[in-house]
Image: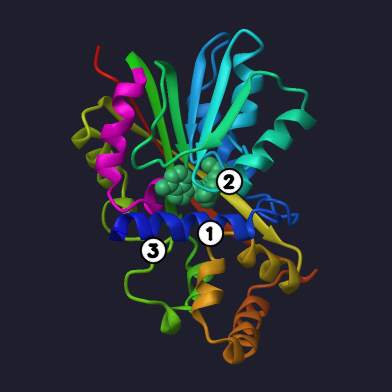
Amino acid sequence: MTDTNEHVARMAKLFDALSATYDDVGVDFFGPIADGLLAAMPPVVGESWLDIGCGRGAVLLPAAEGVGPTGLATGIDISPAMVDLAGIGAQARGLTNVHASVGDAGSPEIEGSFDTVSSCLVLFFLTDPVAALESWLPLLRPDGRLGVTTFGPIDERWKHLDEVFVPFLPPAMRDARTSGGPFTSDEGMEGLVSKAGYSDVRTVTGEVAVRFADAEQWHSFTWSTGQRQMWLSIPEDQRADVRAEAERRLASYADADGSVTFSQGVRHTLATRPA
Ligand SMILES: C[S@@+](CC[C@H](N)C(=O)[O-])C[C@H]1O[C@@H](n2cnc3c(N)ncnc32)[C@H](O)[C@@H]1O
């Protein structure tokens, strides 16, 4: 197995394991971020939309609603459990124009010519983001739209909280919210997308207020997202100490009701396939 295949298999295992609680612990995070992307790149009635790394459908399902019954929303994700949950979510919303299946964002084996391709909070998990973006280009029709969402500036208080994990992390571990290089700036992200062959590359930024009602909810949230891999990097017998230190830091930022609200910057990089 190559390093890339091993990495992709690890991602599938991680997201399978957290899928049951992903975006389901009462914290508004993935929904508002997806809404920002959809506002920056509104679905058009009748179009065909591809969402890469669709997860439980934060973008895919509202996109399906937006394109309507004459359109089609296709999602791929490396995690079979996420794909199943996206299907269940589509059914629950009464959507019949959603097709979700297992697929690798790094080399999607998918047929079709899509009007729009989206990928929300996925690119930084891939070993070669430019190669992935290049592989998405032929899936778009000429003049078709691309929208890729990554994280913007992080709240310094939240960063201080998450620093409890740092001593335990393997050097190569990607932290989705703080990963460096091109992911730290609008220009960096625009550079990746331009290098992959897209035109009209531009950025729309946003900010989401993320409220944790209490320390317990923060803890559940961290296990329900990519941060789960950070907990797993900590030897089991040390996790209680790390949690206690995290909760001490969290308490120092609490409002009078005990809740804590952090801000999360968001970056939507938009582009088109050259005609
Ligand atoms: C943070 S979640 C985002 C999910 C969804 N887009 C959302 O906004 O809620 C990242 C998703 O990327 C998927 N993923 C990670 N690596 C992938 C790969 N190589 N190919 C396809 N999906 C991948 C994970 O399984 C997970 O569902």
Question: CA gap, disc 3 to disc 2?
Answer: 22 Å
Q: Is 28 above or below relative to 213? A: above
Residue found at x 54% / y 61%: 14
Provide the residue designation for mark 1. 13
Contact between marks 3 and 2 (CB within 8 A): the answer is no
Q: Position of residue 2 (x, y in %)?
A: 28, 58
The numbered disc on residue 174 is 3
Q: Any atom of ligand 1 within 8 Å of the CB at mark 1? A: no
Give the Cα separation between the discs numbered 3 and 1.
16 Å
Q: Is residue 267 visible?
A: no
| Viewer-closest of 108 and 172 | 108
Counting from the top left corner in percent of width and height, residue 167 is at 42, 84
Chain-order first, disc 1 or disc 2: 1
Q: Amino acid at mark 2?
A: Pro
**On the image, numbered disc 2 is attached to which residue?**
80
Quadrant holding the N terminus: bottom left
- Residue mark closest to the camera, 3 vs 1: 1
Q: Position of residue 185 (x, y in %)?
A: 31, 50
User: Which secondary structure dominates the residues rendered in magenta?
Assistant: helix
Q: Which residues are magenta?
A: 122-140
How many angstroms separate mark 1 from mark 2 (CA)?
9 Å
